[in-house]
Image (cartoon, rainbow, N blue to C red):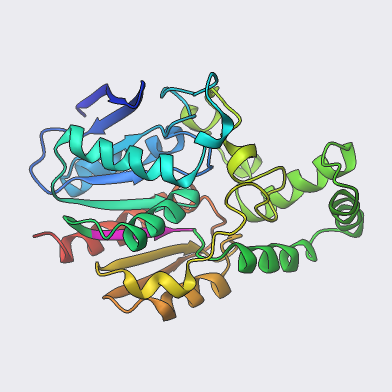
Amino acid sequence: MDIVEGYVPFRDGQTYYRIVGYHYKKTPIVFIHGGPGSTHNSFEVLDSFADYDKRPVIMYDQYGCGLSSLGLDKDKSTYCKKTWVEELINLREKLGLEKMHMMGHSWGGMLSIIYLTDYSPQGILSATLSSTLASASLWDKETHRLIRYLDKEDQLAIQEAEKTGDYTSEAFLKANKDYLKMTVRNLDEMKEIPECLTREKRTSPSYLTAWGVSEFKPMGNLKDYEYLDKLDKIKVPILILSGADDESTPIQNKEMFDRIISEKEWRILSPSRHSTYVEQNKMYQEYLKEFLEKHDK
C-alpha cells in the first residue's frame, strides 16, 4: 500500500495531508475529519478502501489539529468555519484536485455542508455526509432525548452542569463518558484496538472555541449553525451514512434527507454508534464504494 505524506502552505502555517493509493487513476476522495479539533487518525482504519476501490484516498489534519499548524500564537477567533473552509479550498488548489469526491464525518460533514451550500464549489462529483448534522438546535433536542437513556445519576449530573455551567465535576465527567460509550464508541467492546484510535494527538483550543465545553450542544462560535433550510442549494449527489445507535440520530438524518433535492441515498449501519466506519468498517466501505462508482465521471 503506497502512502504519500506532506504539507501544503496555508496562511502563515501549513496543512498536513496523507494520500493512500496515490498511484490509482480514479477520481480521488477527500476525507474530512470531525471535531472540530480532532485529527485524521481514525480514518486510517479506512486505508484499505484505497485498494478496495482502486482510488486515491486523501485525508488531512485541519488547522488547529494534529500535525497541521495549531495556531497557538493566533487569536482563538481563527478557529472558525471560515478558516476551515478556506483551508479546504487551499488544499484542493495545492494538490490540484479539480475533480474530487468528498466524505465528511461528524463535524467534517458540517464543514462539507457549509462548503457545498455557501461556496457552490465546482468539480465535486459527490459528497458523503457521515454521522453529521445540519442543525445545532435539533442536535441539542436529540442529544437531550438520548440523555434520558442514561441512568438517573448521570442525568442529574448533566442537569447540574448545565444549570451551573460547571462541566468539570467528577459526576459530569462520568456521565459524559457513559453517554459517549452509548452513542459514539466503546473501545472496551473491541477485541483488537487499532493503534490509530488511541494515538496521542497534538491539541489546541479549537474544539472549545468552535463547539464548546459540552458534547450535548454547541456553545462556541458554531452555536448558530443552522443549515436545514440551505440544503436545497446542494447540487451534487449525496450519500448519508449513519449508525442505528448514533448521536446523529435518524430524526436528524431524516430531516437532512428530506430537504436535499439533488440525487440522494441514505444508509443506516447497524449495529453502530457514531463511529460508523470503525464499528462497521466492511459495510461502510461497501456502501461508499457502491455510491462512488455511480458518480465517477
Residue 178 at least partly seen: yes
Residue 128 part of the magenta segment:
yes
Does 85 appear above or below 195?
Answer: below
Which image quadrant is residue 273 in? bottom right
Q: Is residue 146 magenta?
A: no
Residue 120 in the image: above or below residue 219? below
Residue occupying image coordinates x 64% and y 55%:
183
Where residue 171 sits in the image (x, y, percent)? Answer: 89, 42
Quadrant in which the C terminus is drawn? bottom left
Q: Is residue 54 above or below residue 16?
A: below
Left or right: residue 148 compared with residue 88: right
Q: Position of residue 102 (x, y in %)?
A: 29, 52
- Name the main secondary structure of what is drawn in magenta: strand
The answer to whether residue 230 is left or right of residue 48 is right
- Asked whether residue 21 is in view, the answer is no
Q: Which residues are magenta?
A: 126-131
Quadrant containing the N terminus in the rendered view: top left
Q: Residue at x 53, y 18 (%)?
A: 73
Residue 30 position, x and y percent, is: 28, 44
Residue at 88% across, 37% down? 170
